[in-house]
Image (tube, rainbow, N blue to C red):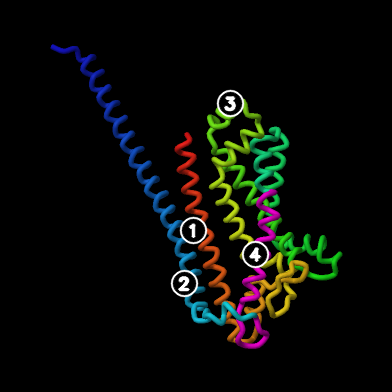
Amino acid sequence: MDNPHQASSVDEARAVTVSALLAGEERLRRRRAASAAVDACAWAAALLAVGVLAAVVVSVAVKGAGAIDASFLTQSTANFGGGGIANALAGTAILVAVAALLAIPTGILVAIYTSELGGARPAVAIRYVLDILAGVPTIVVGIFVFGLIVVPQHRQSGFAGSVALAVVMLPLVARSAHEVLRLVPDSLREAGLALGASRWRTVVSVVVPAAFSGMVTGALLAVARAAGETAPLLFTTSIFPDFVQTDPAQALPNIPVTIFRYSESPDPVKHAQAWGAALVLMLFVLLVSVIARALSARGRRRLGSAR
C-alpha cells in the first residue's frame, strides 16, 4: 500500500503544476490581449494619419484643379482677375536653388566633420546646436534674416529669402547626412586605411560615395521643405513685381507668398488661383518625395550589399 504522505506530496505537486500552468496561460492571454490592443491603436493612428493626408490632398486637388491651365502656368500674376503664377514659379526656383547652393554643401561638410573627422565632444555639441536650430520656428528665422540683411540694405531681396531658406535647410541636410554616414560599415573605412590611404582620403573616396544616395535623399527632402516655407519669405521677399524677376538682388516672386496674398484677396478668382498654386506646390513636393524615396531605397540596398 502506498504511503499516504507520498501520495499527498504528489497531489500537492500536481496542484502546484496545474496552478502554474493556469497562471502562465492567464498571463499569455493578457499579453495577447495587450498586444492586440496596441496593434489596434497603431492601426488606428496610421489610418488617421493617412486619412488626414488624403483629406488634404483631395481637398486641394478638387479646389485647385479647375484653376490650372496653360495660361495659369505661363502668365504672370495680376492684381485683379486673370493672370497666373509663371513669375512665382521662376522666383521660387531661383530662391530654392540659391538656398540649396548655400545649405547643402555646408550641411554635408558639417556632417562629415561630426561623423568622421571631429572629436567626440565638438561633434556632440554641433549636433546639439543643429537639433536646436531645427526646432527654431521659421518665422523667427525670417525675423533674424530681416534684421541681418533686409534692414541694412533697406529693401527686400531674393538673396535674403534664400539665406532664410538655407538656415531652415541646414540642420535637415546636416543631420540626415550624419545619420547616413553612420550607416556606412566600419569595414569600408578599415579597408581604406589598410590600403595606406589617409583618413580624409578614405572619407572622400570610400565613405562619402557609399553614402551618396542617402545624402542626396536628405538634401531633396530639405529642398521640398524649403519650397513650401512661407513665414521667412514674408519678411525677406514678399513685396515683388507682377512680372518675371531673375535678379536675386531684388525681391523675387514666389509661390508661398503668392498663395498667402491670393487667399487674403476678396476676389473669388484669386481664391481659386490660390488653390491652384497650392496644388502645383503640393505636386512638386510629392515629386521630390518620390524621388527621395527611390534614392533612399537604392542607398539602403547598396549599404546592405556592402555589409
Q: Which residues are magenta?
A: 77-106
Disc 4 vs disc 2: which is toward the camera? 4
Q: Is residue 239 left or right of residue 88?
A: right
Q: Nearer the viewer, residue 195 or 284?
A: 195
Disc 3 vs disc 2: which is toward the camera? 3
Q: CA distance from mark 1 to mark 2?
A: 18 Å
Q: CA distance from mark 3 to mark 1?
A: 38 Å
Three-letter residue code for mark 2: Val
Secondary element under disc 1, as helix, strand or loop, is: helix
Disc 3 vs disc 1: which is toward the camera? 3
Disc 1 vs disc 2: which is toward the camera? 1
1 and 4 marks in contact (CB < 8 Å): no
Q: In which quadrant of the rendered image does the N terminus lie? A: top left
Where, by quadrant of the figure, is residue 227 drawn? bottom right
Q: Nearer the viewer, residue 122 or 69?
A: 69
Q: Earlier in the sequence, mark 3 or mark 1?
A: 3
Q: Earlier in the sequence, mark 1 or mark 2?
A: 2
Q: Earlier in the sequence, mark 4 or mark 3?
A: 3
Magenta stretch holds residue 80: yes
Three-letter residue code for mark 4: Glu
Q: Residues within 10 Å of mark 4 (few under 14, many from 20)?
A: some
Q: Which residue is mark 4?
A: 229
Q: CA distance from mark 3 to mark 2?
A: 56 Å
Three-letter residue code for mark 1: Val
Tell me which residue sits at (56%, 42%) in the image. 211
Magenta stretch holds residue 212: no
Tell me which residue sits at (55%, 71%) in the image. 280
Q: Nearer the viewer, residue 188 or 185?
A: 188
